[in-house]
Image (cartoon, grey):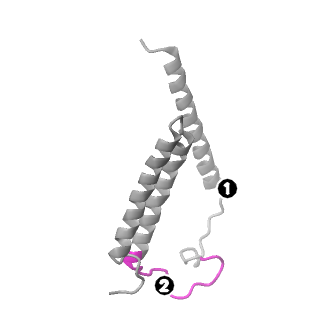
């Protein structure tokens, strides 16, 4: 038999999910009904901060930009994991500090490895 506390927790999650879906549906529906539709020649043009664009909007980027983005994303997510660890420090604060230091050290080794491989060089080879 399922306890009432578990059902209450599931009900709270279902209520949050339903509230989020309702708000999203209302926002999308209102924007569909309220927005003024344009049908001019400039409708499909590229818009960039109100300035007239020069040239094509389609440009090729080097792979290095994607590598920077992936490295940033990886470290950003890893830093997000450090916040709960910092909050979970208990009576073994020194042990936890050593574990976090090892974690950051491993991440630093990844940066050193990428640096030694020449990933951070801007010039083409």
Q: Dot 2, how many residues are within 10 Å of its Cα: few (below 14), some (14-19), or many (20+)?
A: few
Q: Which mark is residue 56?
A: 2
Which corner quadrant holds the N terminus? top left
Q: Nearer the viewer, residue 70 or 106?
A: 106
Q: How many numbered marks does the figure carry?
A: 2
Q: Is residue 94 magenta?
A: no
Could you tell which of marks 1 and 2 lies nearer the N-terminus? Answer: 1
Q: Which residue is located at x 63 percent, y 54 percent? A: 31
Q: What residue did someone put label 1 on?
A: 34
Give coordinates of residue 125: x percent, y percent. Answer: 32, 87
Q: Nearer the viewer, residue 110 or 121?
A: 110
Q: Which residue is located at x 36 percent, y 71 percent? A: 114
Vertical position of residue 43 compared to residue 89: above or below:
below
* Secondary structure beneath label 1: helix
Give coordinates of residue 79: x percent, y percent. Answer: 50, 54
Give coordinates of residue 11: x percent, y percent. Answer: 54, 25
Vertical position of residue 70 compared to residue 16: above or below:
below
For the residues carrying marks 1 and 2, which lies nearer the camera in this image? 2
Q: Which residue is located at x 54 percent, y 21 percent? A: 8
Vertical position of residue 29 compared to residue 69: above or below:
above
Res 40 → quadrant = bottom right
Magenta-colored span: 48-64
Between the residue at mark 1 and the residue at mark 2, the CA separation in whole angstroms equals 32 Å
Q: Nearer the viewer, residue 28 or 86?
A: 86
Q: Is residue 53 magenta?
A: yes
Q: Nearer the viewer, residue 119 or 16?
A: 119
């Amino acid at each position: 038999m399922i306890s009432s506390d578990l059902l209450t927790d599931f009900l709270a999650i279902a209520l949050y999910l339903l509230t989020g879906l309702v708000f999203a549906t209302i926002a999308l529906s209102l924007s569909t009904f309220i927005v003024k539709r344009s049908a001019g020649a400039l409708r499909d043009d590229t818009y960039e901060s109100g300035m007239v664009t020069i040239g094509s909007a389609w440009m090729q980027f080097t792979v290095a930009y994607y590598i920077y983005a992936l490295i940033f994303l990886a470290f950003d997510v890893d830093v997000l994991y450090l916040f709960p660890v910092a909050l979970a420090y208990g009576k073994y604060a020194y042990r936890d500090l050593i574990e976090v230091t090892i974690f950051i050290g491993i991440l630093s080794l990844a940066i050193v490895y990428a640096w030694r491989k020449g990933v951070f060089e801007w010039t083409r080879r």
